[in-house]
Image (tube, rainbow, N blue to C red):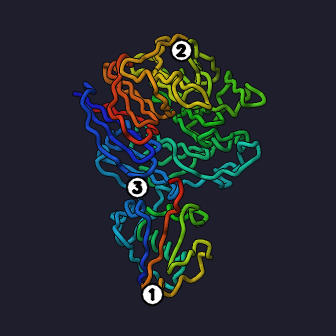
């Protein structure tokens, strides 16, 4: 089943991807961190490597994943995201950690 | 009339400074890639409108940018949605993966950490981009953790030249204060197979077969921070410069010591002479006088600013040892900026222009070989690199 997911990316990555505001992505199958990021990178290839490592797929250390007022950064990439994200009610947030002032 | 285009990479973006051959009135554009660190930008000698830039961030990693119109517009090669709305290409341009293959890659060893223990190689960023002298689609990248990569498709995809990291001394390499970076790549117009590179802190290396095999070229260097001062590998080389007409003559600003080699790096001798301090980062060679060289002495490795608060470029017209201070137009009181290793460049106009950028955000130009200086800009973010293109 194809669903439309809302994703909010940090301002620097919006500039890089030439987008304003939220990104809307079609995700096929289960909605997980991995499937959302796969869809994000397929739609915006210039973001490859900016959110997760090219090879290991590990989340970059200064980025966090939030949704529905929860910190999902340390969840497995294959854990289903909250239903509100999966049905497009709530966005999946990719947030730069506050570091360095 | 000829023009110059100065490419300045800073802690918070890139800037392009353009002037006619008089180099008095400047047009400043930027910031490009605002908010990102731009470690280096350099134009292709084969096509001056082709410029490559290394855009990097502790948050988002490495981005390679490319311009085909002299810096007016930029793209991420192979990574733009405008490329193929139906079948998007993958963003290979930012992908630097060490070669671990049995066929071409040497075993991925470890390197030395600050405390002497061994650590695995981990990609951090691109410090330096060196476009080919003849092909606008070929460009070399010097990266941290130290390795050299090459692209032959306009920076769309990158392959490690793994002979360097695999030649055997890798476990002795260690990071300098700025990380374990490959910061200098010098191509030889007379011999396309020859490339010089330098790494902090490993030393200088040379290939004579287009990167298949490499050898350390550090004989004569001495470094007090190592148990054995004259070891083959482990020296903190800050920068190396070469005049294109004399590819066997190299000048080096080491951590401490200004050095010279007349035999392609086989042997080095110190030419610090009467410099007030021989610590520093930049070194460059006059475009038309191969024995005229420039450095900016910095007080010490613990005090990264000019001695006595006076910003002085030193020029030697004898290839070292005898140096004169160049101060006309430079601040001679209360100046405590640094000039980083890739932040000096020379143009090739008849009256050779010398340029350098500071961590205080100034980019200075001397249109007369160093006799007089004036700031092109005073208030940029900290300048990481300066390159200049001389345009018809």
Residue B76, image x, y percentages: 40, 56
Chain holding disc 1: A
Lateral position of residue B229 relative to residue B382, left or right: right
Quadrant of the frame with the N terminus of chain B: top left
Q: Would you name the residue on which mark 1 appears?
A: A87
Residue B296, image x, y percentages: 49, 24
Discs 3 and 1 share one subunit:
no
Residue B320: mark: 2
Q: Quadrant of residue B86?
A: bottom left
Which of discs 1 and 2 lies nearer the camera? The answer is: 1
> In the rendered structure, which disc, 3 or 2, sits on the residue that comes first in sequence?
3
Residue B77: mark: 3
Task: Residue at 61% x, 76% y: name it.
Answer: A75
Task: Residue at 41% x, 24% y: name it.
Answer: B331
Lateral position of residue A62 relative to residue A12, left or right: right
Task: Residue at 38% x, 73% y: name it.
Answer: A22
Mark-to-mark CA distance, 1 and 2: 70 Å
Quadrant of the frame with the C terminus of chain B: top left
Discs 3 and 2 share one subunit:
yes
Q: Residues within 10 Å of mark 2 (few under 14, many from 20)?
A: many
Chain holding disc 2: B
Which of discs 3 and 1 lies nearer the camera? The answer is: 1
Residue B80, image x, y percentages: 37, 62
In front of the other: B5 or B362: B362
Taking A4 as reference, is B210 above or below it? above
């Amino acid at each position: 089943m194809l669903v439309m997911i809302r994703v909010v990316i940090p301002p620097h990555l919006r500039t890089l991807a030439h987008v304003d505001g939220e990104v809307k992505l079609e995700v096929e199958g289960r909605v997980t961190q991995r499937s959302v990021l796969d869809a994000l990178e397929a739609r915006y290839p210039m973001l490859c490597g900016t959110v997760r490592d090219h090879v290991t797929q590990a989340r970059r250390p200064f980025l966090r994943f939030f949704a529905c007022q929860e910190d999902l950064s340390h969840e497995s990439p294959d854990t289903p995201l909250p239903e509100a994200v999966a049905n497009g009610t709530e966005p999946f947030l990719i947030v730069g950690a506050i570091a360095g002032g | 009339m000829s023009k110059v285009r100065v490419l300045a990479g800073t802690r918070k973006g890139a800037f392009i400074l353009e002037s006619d051959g008089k180099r008095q009135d400047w047009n400043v554009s930027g910031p490009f890639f605002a908010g990102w660190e731009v470690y280096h930008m350099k134009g292709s000698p084969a096509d001056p409108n082709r410029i490559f830039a290394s855009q990097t961030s502790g948050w988002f990693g490495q981005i390679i940018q490319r311009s085909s119109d002299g810096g007016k517009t930029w793209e991420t090669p192979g990574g733009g949605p405008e490329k193929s709305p139906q079948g998007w290409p993958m963003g290979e341009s930012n992908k630097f993966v060490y070669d671990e293959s049995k066929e071409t890659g040497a075993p991925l060893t470890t390197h030395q950490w600050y405390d002497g223990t061994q650590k695995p190689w981990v990609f951090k960023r691109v410090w330096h981009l060196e476009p080919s002298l003849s092909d606008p689609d070929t460009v070399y990248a010097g990266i941290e953790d130290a390795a050299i990569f090459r692209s032959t498709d306009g920076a769309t995809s990158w392959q490690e030249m793994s002979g360097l990291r695999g030649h055997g001394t890798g476990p002795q390499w260690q990071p300098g204060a700025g990380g374990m970076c490959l910061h200098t790549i010098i191509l030889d117009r007379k011999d396309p197979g020859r490339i010089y590179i330098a790494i902090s802190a490993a030393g200088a290396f040379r290939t004579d077969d287009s990167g298949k095999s490499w050898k350390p070229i550090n004989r004569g260097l001495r470094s007090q921070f190592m148990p054995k001062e004259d070891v083959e590998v482990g020296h903190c080389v800050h920068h190396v410069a070469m005049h294109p007409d004399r590819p066997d003559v190299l000048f080096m600003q080491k951590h401490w010591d200004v050095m010279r080699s007349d035999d392609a790096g086989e042997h080095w001798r110190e030419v610090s002479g009467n410099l007030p301090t021989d610590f520093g980062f930049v070194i460059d060679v006059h475009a038309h006088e191969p024995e005229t060289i420039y450095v900016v002495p910095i007080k010490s490795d613990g005090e990264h600013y000019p001695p006595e608060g006076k910003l002085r470029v030193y020029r030697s017209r004898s290839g070292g040892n005898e140096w004169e201070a160049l101060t006309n137009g430079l601040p001679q009181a209360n100046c405590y900026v640094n000039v980083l290793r890739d932040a000096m460049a020379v143009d090739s106009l008849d009256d050779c222009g010398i340029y350098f950028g500071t961590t205080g955000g100034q980019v200075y130009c001397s249109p007369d070989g160093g006799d007089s200086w004036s700031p092109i800009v005073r208030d940029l973010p900290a300048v990481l690199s300066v390159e200049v293109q001389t345009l018809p």
